[in-house]
C-alpha cells in the first residue's frame, strides 16, 4: 500500500512559513528550492516530507493567490507544549471558530484543530491516527 510521504503547502511567503513550521512543530529543514515551478523549502519530521512553496505558475487553476491544502495532522508526545508553540506563533484554535464539537477519541488534545500561518488548518494528536504507525524510536523499534 502507498503511504503518504509528501505534503505540499502553497504559501505566499515561504520564509515566514518556514519560521512558523520550524518553530511551532520543530520540523527540520531538508533544503531550499528555487526552480522554474516554485520557490520554497522542504522540511521533515523524520517520517514525511513537507514542502512550503510559492508557486510561479497557477498549477491548480485556483489562481496565484491560492494558499494551502485542506489540513494536515501532526503527532506529538507533548500536545500541550506543541499547542503552546503554535499559539505563540499566532496560531488559533479552529474548533472554536467553526463551532466544532470536541472529538471523543482520547488521542486528541482539546482543542484538536488549529489555524496556523496563512490560515492553514491542522490537527494536533498525542498518538498516531488509526492505521498509521508511531514514529520509530532510535534503533528502529516502534514506540
Image (spheres, grey):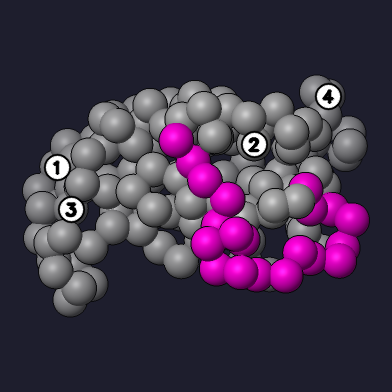
Displayed quadrant of residue 62: bottom left
Spatial separation of the CA atoms under disc 2 and disc 3: 29 Å
**Front disc: 3 or 1:** 3
**Front disc: 3 or 4:** 3
The one nearer the camera, 79 or 7, is: 79
Q: Quadrant of the N terminus?
A: bottom right
- x%, y% of residue 2? 62, 66
Q: What residue does disc 3 label? A: 55
Q: Quadrant of the C terminus?
A: top right
Indicate which disc residue 56 carries: none
Does 65 sit above or below residue 24? below
Q: Are marks 2 and 3 in contact (CB under 8 Å)?
A: no
Question: Label 2 crowding class (10 Å Cα cut-off): few <14, some 14-19, many 20+?
Answer: many
Indicate which disc residue 35 carries: 1
Which of disc 1 and disc 3 is earlier in sequence? 1
**Front disc: 2 or 3:** 2
**Which residue is depicted at the point 80% across and 23% down?**
138
Which of disc 1 and disc 2 is earlier in sequence? 1
Q: What residue does disc 2 label? A: 83
The answer to whether residue 133 shows anywhere in this view is: no
Left or right, 95 with respect to 143, comes to left
- Secondary structure state at the residue bearing disc 4: loop
Which of disc 4 and disc 3 is earlier in sequence? 3
The residue segment tinted magenta is: 90-109
Spatial separation of the CA atoms under disc 4 and disc 2: 28 Å
Question: Label 4 crowding class (10 Å Cα cut-off): few <14, some 14-19, many 20+?
Answer: few
Q: Are marks 2 and 1 in contact (CB under 8 Å)?
A: no
Which of disc 1 and disc 4 is earlier in sequence? 1
**Which residue is depicted at the point 10% across and 53% down?**
56
Amino acid at each position: 500500500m502507498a503511504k503518504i510521504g509528501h505534503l505540499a503547502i502553497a504559501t505566499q511567503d515561504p520564509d515566514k512559513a518556514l519560521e512558523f513550521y520550524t518553530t511551532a512543530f520543530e520540523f527540520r529543514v531538508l533544503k531550499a528550492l528555487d526552480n522554474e515551478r516554485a520557490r520554497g523549502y522542504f522540511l521533515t519530521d523524520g517520517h514525511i516530507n513537507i514542502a512550503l512553496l510559492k508557486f510561479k505558475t497557477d498549477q491548480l487553476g485556483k489562481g496565484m493567490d491560492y494558499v494551502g491544502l485542506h489540513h494536515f495532522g501532526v503527532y506529538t508526545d507533548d500536545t500541550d507544549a506543541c499547542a503552546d508553540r503554535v499559539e505563540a506563533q499566532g496560531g488559533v484554535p479552529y474548533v472554536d471558530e467553526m463551532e466544532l464539537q470536541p472529538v471523543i477519541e482520547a488521542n486528541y488534545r482539546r482543542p484538536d484543530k488549529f489555524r496556523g500561518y496563512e490560515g492553514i488548518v491542522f490537527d494536533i494528536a498525542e498518538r498516531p491516527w488509526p492505521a498509521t504507525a508511531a514514529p520509530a524510536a532510535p534503533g528502529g523499534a516502534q514506540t
